[in-house]
Image: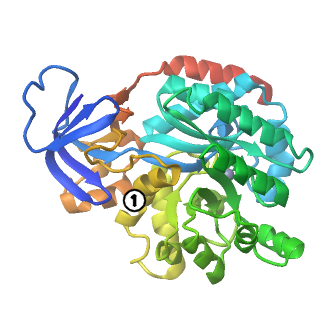
Amino acid sequence: MLLKNVRFAATPKGILENVNIEIEGPTISKISKTVPVGSKTGNVIDCSRLLAVPSFVNAHTHVPMTFLRGYGEGLTLNEWLTTRVWPAEAKLKPKDVHAFTKMGIIEMIRSGTTAFNDMYFFMDEVARACAESGVRGFLSHGIISLKDKTKDLKETERFIREWKSKNELVTPFVGPHAIYTCDEETLLRSKELAEKYKTKLHIHLSETRKEVYDCWRAHGMRPVEYLDKIGFLGTNVIAAHCGWLTKNEIKILGERRVNVVHCPVSNMKLATGGEMPLPELLATRANVALGTDGASSNNSLSMFGEMKMAALLHKHARWDPTVAGVDEVLKMATMNGAHALGLDAGILEEGKLADITLIDLDSTLVQPVVRDRLLAHLVYAADSSCISTVVCNGKILMQDKIMRVDEENVREAFVKAFAKFS
Ligand SMILES: [Zn+2]
């Protein structure tokens, strides 16, 4: 495939102008100023009115939760989970999860996301949905040890064995849900599993003040300090939220080079109060990525909204327009997300995976088209309507806004599965 005469290519390292991007198999094989010889054969896309960006990486979500979008508004995290989310989830069947995931994947492709880090259950269905739709899923069966200490660990190991080399788009992770739903033994057994299968750990961490207080009462220390004390933290940990951190916890996350996922919209919507200390974390060796969380608490899976909120929240809270710059935020949504997941993508460079989104420069939302303003357009102004074409693993998932998957079928299956929840 050849992306010919790309007007602009925005990467976290800068903006290229008038280049040709050649794709061979799943990889970007060459980026050059001259159109390669013999390029008339194969799939050639004229990009003279398009901006190429690395496809977004949603580093923390629960995609099947599309069925809970708009349900239980105006509640705190605890009330919302116990009175709305968990009772509804108890009615879920595997085929429902498949239908709800497919709907979420369409939303993600349309908004330029081709890789996501997910924690839920019936993960075979989520994995199947990824393989069918052509997007990358990094998938954890959520582990909770409150009632049964071994059931979820066993299911995690079964899922890893089943999917670890079944499909190149699917990567199984280990997902201990949180420190308040997993005891110490379960956290450590999760870590052992991740080490045994050379995979990553996905956990919710320091999301609410209640979590911090409960941890303090139970262990005499704060959540990050507790996880560090038991030896859980490391470069293979992806910790979502981290809204309530002290200076010492920031230092620990940096020293252990943990991947931290900022979810500003979900945090603000659930009124968790503490905002992630983003500038302080970015100054450490922690890797900070961006995630939407589920459509239930966002209520969107679009990384455009997440980038805008991340950029705005910290400027506003600090009275400082210099923090959370557009280049930094775009990097969090692409390169840093890819790094967190161990994915060789997130930047437009030769040898990287061809996960590329093409944005229509004729869209009203990105006017005027001026090189130095493109990153600001991406973070503050653009939305899904600007996206023309999406490529993942060297394959086209959407071209000129036409999806490869049959959207009508996905919608019908969604409506059918949703009937019992309405
Ligand atoms: Zn979450």
Tag 1: amino acid: Lys
**Is there any visible trace of residue 182 in the rendered image?**
no
Residue in front for this viewpoint, 222 or 262: 222
Quick one: which residue is furthest to the front in this view? Answer: 196
Q: Report x, y in % for residue 348.
A: 29, 48
Q: Report x, y in % for residue 365.
A: 32, 49
Q: Looking at the picture, does residue 194 appear above or below residue 212?
A: above
Quadrant in which the N terminus appears: top left
Quick one: which residue is furthest to the right in this view? Answer: 147
Q: Report x, y in % for residue 377.
A: 32, 56
Q: Looking at the picture, does residue 343 appear above or below residue 127?
A: below
- Name the secondary structure under disc 1: helix
Residue carrying label 1: 331
Circle 1 residues within 10 Å: few <14, some 14–19, many ≥20: many
Q: Looking at the picture, does residue 223 appear above or below residue 390?
A: below
Residue in front for this viewpoint, 396 or 99: 396
Colour scheme of this structure image?
rainbow
Where on the picture, by quarter, is residue 187?
bottom right
Does 241 sit left or right of 406 as displayed? right
The residue that appears at 76% across and 75% down in the rendered structure is 222
Q: Looking at the picture, does residue 175 appear above or below residue 109?
A: below
The residue that appears at 58% across and 69% down in the rendered structure is 256
